[in-house]
Structure formats: structure tokens, C-alpha cells
């Protein structure tokens, strides 16, 4: 009965979030149309990006709410889910620009779509620069929408509440984490190699893990009036889960199947990502291989042969095994903390299923 109840409740929530997003963005599209019909591609990009997806953050928020006694299908948690989805979309738009990633979910990323629009219309000046500028503005608009939607919750999300503090902290930490990420790309090769793994773990914690799992779960709990003790328990479960989730993403960025991930093979290597996986490789590979890795990482012209060689280095030096072991360690921490949470069977089982899917995914 629990499995069926979870499917039904999650399905209804995801449907409600989608409908809420559609209604909100439809209203915003009308407002933007009064400014100029030329603004339509910004709205279209946002609408496309928030349509579908795993809804991991919204679902973590929902079960945090339900675990703290919140009612199913309540408008406040649906609105919170929408705000998280819009924030996620803003982060993805900006992240793809920073990472020079031309694909997202198997199609062109937002900045690439604007570049293609420029080219198809035969406009003047540089198409790539236009694409980046338009996408930055689209991401900023999406970030503004996220705040606007969250504010609609009202008193539960008002200034001074725990929910508002979590939402504000989440957004600030992602920006700081993004900066640490790009800093490590340029400074990593000349920094202390022994600290590469620790720096990479700090990046994934603040850039991804906290906003993917920890803060959404706590946000849902806070909106439902969770105690400090329950919120601490949520954090003990969700933070290691989020780190394991991102480590799995880093492995997929190097070894994932493009047909499943929607990104070219070895894309993270071309982007120069100084991940935990790469940190282990830099430290554990022999000097020649380590130097080759440092030299090739971040080259946009990496071909299949170079990607294959970098993969070989990562595997043979034990970096892949070390990362898998760390995923297992963090996953065990998360599941042990989950079993200590004072939750009823339905939210407990739902969170367990989300956690299992997060650390074992192929895309």
C-alpha cells in the first residue's frame, strides 16, 4: 500500500507543480508581451527548462513538509516546489554559460539557442556574445521569478522565519560555490595538489549538495513548522546524500553514456572540471600521467582519443574506485541518518526511494 500511496501522492504533487508553473509563467508571458513581442524567447527558454526534469529538489521539499506533518496537496508546498524549480532553472542557465556547455538534456543549452536564433535571423555582430548575454538575462529573470513565487507563500516564508532564512542561504551558497568552482579551474593547477580533493569536496557541498537535497528538505520541514531537532536530522541525512549525488554526476560527466546523459562523452574534461574524481587522479597517477591530465584538462578540442586516454588514467590510477568508495561511504551515512529520523512510514519510504535513485542513477 505504501508504494502505491507514494506514487499517487508524488504524482499529484508533480502535476500540481507543473500546473502552477504553467499558470505563473503564462501570466508573466502576458506581462512581457506588453513590453515587446521580442522578449518572447526569454520566456520560452524558461518555460522549456522548467518543463519536465526529475523534480528532485521539489520532491525533497515536499517530503520534508510531509515528514514534519504538512498536509498533502497544500498550496504552500506546491508554491515552494515551483520556486525551487525556477531557482534550479536559473542556476542551470548560468552554469551552462560558465561551463561553456552547449547541450542540456539532449538539446541546445539556453545560450546556444540564442546564438542559433542570432544566426538564423542573420543579425549583426557576434552570435556567441549575443547568446551569452541573452542567456545571462534569462537566468536573472528566472531568479527574479523564483523570489516572486516564494514570496507568494506568505507568512510561512516571511522575513525572519526559518523557511526564509533557508531559502536565502541556499541561493547565496550556490553563488559562492559557483565561484569556488571557476576559481579551482584556473588556480587548481598551481595550487597544492594534496588539497585538491578537499577543495573539490567543498565546491560540491556549496555549489550542488546543499541546494539539491539538504536545503530543499529543510525548507519543506520549516514551512510545516518542524522542530530544530528534526531539521538537524534532515541535514544529517540530506547533506551526505547530496554530496554522493554530485559525485555520481561527476562520474557520469566523464564516463556517462551520451544517449542517457544528454551530454557529449567526456564533457566535464573539456570543461576543465576540477572534481573529486580529477583530484584523486592528479594525486594518485604517476608523474607523467598526472602532468598529461593537467595539460589536457579544459581543452575544448579534446577528441575521442584524448578523452579515452584521460579515462584510462583515471581508471588505472584508482581514482574511479576511490570516488565510488566515497559515494558508498556518504550513501551509508545518509541511509543511517535516515533511519534515525522520527518519521511515519510514508515519508520515510519516499525519502529512501529518492535517495536510492539519486546515488544509483545513470543520467
Image (spheres, grey):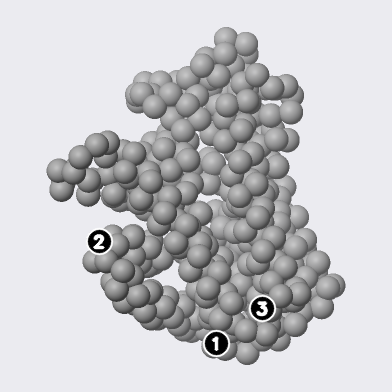
Which residue has dot 3 on it?
157
In front: label 1 or label 3: 3
Image position of 66 with respect to 38: above or below: below
Question: SS for tag 2?
Answer: helix
- Of the numbered discs 2 and 1, the one sitting upstream in the chain is 2
Which residue has dot 1 on it?
75
Q: Nearer the viewer, residue 108 or 263?
A: 108
**Residue 298 x %, y %:** 47, 26
**Residue 297 x %, y %:** 50, 24
- Direction top: furthest residue: 288
Image position of 11 with respect to 290: above or below: below
Label 1 – label 3 distance at C-alpha: 13 Å
**Residue 140 x %, y %:** 47, 57
Q: Which corner quadrant of the image does residue 22 belong to?
A: bottom left
Residue 2 visible in rendering: no
Crowding near pointer 1: few (<14 within 10 Å), some, many (20+)? some
Question: SS for tag 1?
Answer: helix
Residue 142 visible in rendering: yes
Residue at (43% x, 30% y) in the render:
270
Q: Is residue 85 left or right of residue 283?
A: left
Q: Nearer the viewer, residue 239 or 324?
A: 239
**Residue 171 x %, y %:** 62, 58
In front: label 2 or label 3: 2
The reply to whether discs 2 and 1 touch (Cβ–Cβ < 8 Å) is no
Q: Nearer the viewer, residue 143 or 13?
A: 143
Q: Is residue 117 left or right of residue 202?
A: left
- Of the numbered discs 2 and 3, the one sitting upstream in the chain is 2
Which residue has dot 2 on it?
38
Image position of 152 with respect to 43: above or below: below
Crowding near pointer 3: few (<14 within 10 Å), some, many (20+)? many
Amino acid at each position: 500500500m505504501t508504494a502505491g500511496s507514494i506514487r499517487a501522492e508524488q504524482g499529484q504533487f508533480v502535476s500540481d507543480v507543473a500546473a502552477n508553473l504553467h499558470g505563473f509563467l503564462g501570466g508573466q508571458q502576458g506581462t512581457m508581451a506588453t513590453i515587446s513581442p521580442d522578449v518572447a524567447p526569454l520566456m520560452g527558454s524558461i518555460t522549456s527548462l522548467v518543463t519536465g526534469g526529475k523534480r528532485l529538489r521539489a520532491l525533497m521539499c515536499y517530503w520534508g513538509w510531509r515528514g514534519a506533518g504538512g498536509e498533502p496537496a497544500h498550496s504552500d508546498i506546491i508554491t515552494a516546489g515551483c520556486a525551487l524549480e525556477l531557482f534550479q532553472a536559473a542556476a542551470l542557465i548560468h552554469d551552462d554559460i560558465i561551463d561553456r556547455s552547449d547541450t542540456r538534456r539532449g538539446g541546445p543549452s539556453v545560450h546556444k539557442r540564442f546564438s542559433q536564433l542570432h544566426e538564423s535571423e542573420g543579425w549583426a555582430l557576434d552570435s556567441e556574445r549575443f547568446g551569452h548575454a541573452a542567456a545571462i538575462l534569462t537566468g536573472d529573470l528566472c531568479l527574479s521569478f523564483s523570489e516572486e513565487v516564494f514570496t507568494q507563500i506568505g507568512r510561512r516564508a516571511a522575513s525572519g522565519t526559518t523557511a526564509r532564512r533557508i531559502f536565502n542561504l541556499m541561493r547565496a551558497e550556490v553563488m559562492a560555490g559557483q565561484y569556488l568552482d571557476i576559481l579551482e579551474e584556473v588556480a587548481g593547477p598551481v595550487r597544492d595538489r594534496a588539497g585538491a580533493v578537499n577543495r573539490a569536496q567543498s565546491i560540491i557541498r556549496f555549489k550542488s549538495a546543499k541546494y539539491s537535497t539538504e536545503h530543499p528538505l529543510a525548507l519543506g520541514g520549516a514551512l510545516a513548522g518542524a522542530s530544530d531537532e528534526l531539521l538537524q536530522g534532515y541535514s544529517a541525512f540530506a547533506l551526505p546524500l547530496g554530496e554522493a549525488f554530485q559525485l555520481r554526476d561527476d562520474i557520469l560527466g566523464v564516463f556517462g553514456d551520451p544517449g542517457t546523459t544528454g551530454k557529449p562523452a567526456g564533457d566535464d574534461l573539456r570543461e576543465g572540471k576540477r572534481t573529486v574524481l580529477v583530484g584523486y587522479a592528479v594525486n594518485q597517477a604517476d608523474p607523467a600521467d598526472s602532468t598529461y591530465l593537467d595539460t589536457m584538462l579544459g581543452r575544448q578540442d579534446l577528441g575521442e582519443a584524448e578523452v579515452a586516454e584521460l579515462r584510462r588514467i583515471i581508471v588505472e590510477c584508482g581514482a574511479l574506485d576511490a570516488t565510488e568508495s566515497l559515494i558508498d561511504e556518504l550513501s551509508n551515512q545518509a541511509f543511517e541518518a535516515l533511519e534515525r529520523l522520527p518519521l511515519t512510514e510514508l515519508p520515510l519510504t519516499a525519502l529512501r526511494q529518492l535517495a536510492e535513485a539519486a546515488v544509483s542513477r545513470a543520467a
